[in-house]
Image: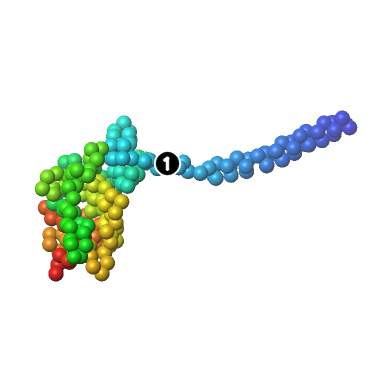
Amino acid sequence: MAKTEKLFSKIVMILFLILIVIGFTVPGITNNEQNDPQPIVEPRLCRGDADCYLTCEGQPLPVICVQNLCQQNECGFSYVEYDQNNPIIFKLEVMVDSGTVEAPRIEKFDLASRSRPQNFYVSFGVNDEVTSFSSRLSLNLILDKALILLHDKCIRIDSTSYCENSNYFLSVLVNGQESDILGNYIPQNGDKVSISYAANNPLD
């Protein structure tokens, strides 16, 4: 009888120890599963749109490059959808007075010569013609393809910024009318867009 009680006590003790081990192990495993961070998609550097392609379900997905960063790094919905069959065609000119108030020097930029061949979302042609292969590209995104940045009341070309002040005006005219949203304007078919930084307001 005593032997049976000892054996029973040992079994109970072993089961108790197993339960203790399980009690400490299982919560740790479940917590680790719950706390696993989501996989981080690293940003990708680019010189042009061609560097940003993704392959999704065996098909290439075009991705736009903006300020040397791919704007999408994993498969899924793309706001800036590439549409080769329905391009937006409009006119765009950029002019800057790099002289002085007394001696103005107006320079009109050749956007086609400033564009990189790796870009396919935007194409610059002759006579100020621009072709945008997305109906959602703003002026800011289009100008980026010519290495020009339009922000607030400044336009940056190469390493030089031209900002509006008491002597100079920065204006964005769309079909002869001033645009209040500047670089956020999304060009439409047939538009004539003129961006100028000069001592004289073009609307005066």
Residue ranking furthest to the front = 103
Q: Residue 32, position in %: x, y?
A: 57, 42
What's the residue type where badge 1 is placed? Glu
Q: Residue 50, position in %: x, y?
A: 28, 37
Tell me, yes or no, if residue 189 can be seen here: no
Instruction: Give the residue pinned by disc 1.
Output: 42
User: Which residue corresponds to the image point at 85% horizontal and 33% vertical from the top-left?
Assistant: 6
Looking at the rendering, in which quadrant would you find the C terminus? bottom left
Tell me, yes or no, if residue 201 can be seen here: yes
Q: Residue 61, position in %: x, y?
A: 29, 37
User: Which residue corresponds to the image point at 89% horizontal and 32% vertical from the top-left?
Assistant: 2
User: Which residue corresponds to the image point at 29% horizontal and 33% vertical from the top-left?
Assistant: 59
Q: Is residue 16 left or right of residue 197?
A: right
Looking at the rendering, in which quadrant would you find the N terminus? top right
Q: Provide the secondary structure element on which disc 1 rests.
A: loop
Q: Nearer the viewer, residue 92 or 154?
A: 154
Colour scheme of the picture:
rainbow
Q: Residue 146, position in %: x, y?
A: 23, 47
Q: Nearer the viewer, residue 60 or 201?
A: 201
